[in-house]
Image (cartoon, grey):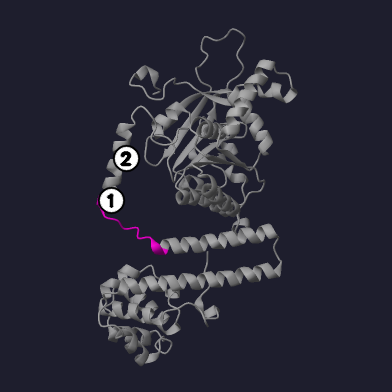
Amino acid sequence: MKFMSNENRNESGLPAARDAEMGLICSVVLKPEAADDFADLPPEAFHHEDLREMWNALRQMSAEGKPIDLITLTQWLADNDRLDMAGGIAGVTDAATFVPTPEARAGYATILRDKWLRREAIFLANEVTGLARKEAQTTDELLAEVELRMMGLREKAGSQRQNPVRHVREAVVEAVEHIDKVYRSRGSTVGLETGVHDLDRMTGGLRGSQMVIVAGRPSHGKSSLGMQFALHAAVEKQVPTLVFSVEMPSEQLMVRALCSYAEINLGRVRDGFFSKKDMDNLNAQMERLHAAPLFIDATPGLTSAQFRSRARAAHAAHGIGLIIVDYLQIMRGSSKRAKENRQMEVAEISMTLKMVANELNIPVVAMAQLNRDAEEYGLPKLSHLRDSGSIEQDADMVLLIHRLDKKRGKKKDGDDEDKPDHNCLLMLEKQRNGPTGHIKLQFDSAYTHFRNVTAKRYSNNEDERQH
């Protein structure tokens, strides 16, 4: 989000603290090495123009490695024709000699940040009022724009509060705690299980803050696999799960989910030719699904701003522990700039998914489409992700679905000697903190369901594990 400069705004009656602004400037003049501690504090944080000019000068002098004191500051402003705007020699002298010691500088900076963000909130409210009065946008577009701008202000506030520099002891403690947790839970998955045994073993399950991409060509089963992850989490593990079905209506999605979970031929359900036993099984699974903490948002044309807003609301209301998005490239960007360029739009959507995963500290699994080139090669590659390289860049984990049965010709009856134990490869092509590799699966098209080839998730018997 781009914030307007103070020069373009009416400054009367706005939150400000001139003494704190002068105190911070004086503190840096008295202790120049302290300038590095506040390098991320922009000139806009200073409400008063004369002090804003001085702070801008101090930042630039520090960045250039120039010595800082009252004389050098005054000279820099004069050499750059900014001395009058900074209040002249008398104004600079007053600010540079305002406090006796620089020890309270952190407190001054905290006050400045607080006043600055309050001013930004006021400016944002005024801008939103103007947008609402013009009626140049639809209500949905207006709300999306407001959400996007609020998102920018929230991020600005968060970045100003957090100090990313930590002593190594904190990271060491966290690392040891994680290793201890893995040791104590050996034989089970530390993160959230997907139900795909070899994937859970290779990754340790889905983790908080992860953005996971499951990509494939159309009709290769990416939606089925995403829903399989969702059902395993919500039904088997009772983890509240939110599915954004951008492409498929919720009723159709649940018909496929029920058939997959109950192992009933989807084609027979469509034409009504299924048995009473199938119906009894369907009812039994319906009861399990009915009781599961599974939530669906089937909004067509979902925007990135709507996604973030609804994900946050659902997380607050239901304690969502997993989000599935089907699928990424059919979502829409929220900013006007993104709508003018497809790659920028997809980059915005991808970044939003990752930001939500970080903000809510839960895994976000998004289905994505591979481009046509993936069908011309033996195996799909990361470079085949459609529309934008930012998807690969933002993702913590990328899974590519490669259906072998789409390539093979039909076998003759009785020709089962060389029938493979799998017809699909789930290719773990990227994992930030772990190995990559191929996982064999059997895709049952009648039930739109992926079956494990490996019977056990964890085993010390090499014959029971894929290599």
Q: Residue at x 26, y 52 (%)?
A: 168
Most foreground residue, 75 or 373: 75
Label 1 secondary element? helix
Q: Give the answer, above or below, for where 411 lies relative to 305.
A: above
Q: Is residue 389 visible?
A: no
Q: Locate residue 62 relative to residue 252 in the image: left or right.
A: left
- Residue 164 part of the magenta-drawn span: yes
Q: How many marks?
A: 2
Q: Amino acid at mark 2?
A: His
Q: Amino acid at mark 1?
A: Glu
Most foreground residue, 288 or 80: 288
Quarter of the picture containing the C terminus is: top left
> Which residue corresponds to mark 2?
178
Q: Locate residue 463 relative to residue 243 in the image: left or right.
A: left
Q: Which residues are magenta?
A: 160-170
Question: Residue 102's x, y, as percent?
Answer: 27, 77
Q: Give the answer, above or below, for where 111 lies relative to 309.
A: below
> What's the distance in space between the residues labelled 2 and 1, CA to CA?
13 Å
Question: Residue 78's x, y, as percent?
Answer: 37, 87
Q: Is residue 284 visible?
A: yes
Q: Residue at x 57, y 59 (%)?
A: 148
Question: Residue 415's x, y, as percent?
Answer: 57, 9
Q: Quadrant of residue 177?
A: top left
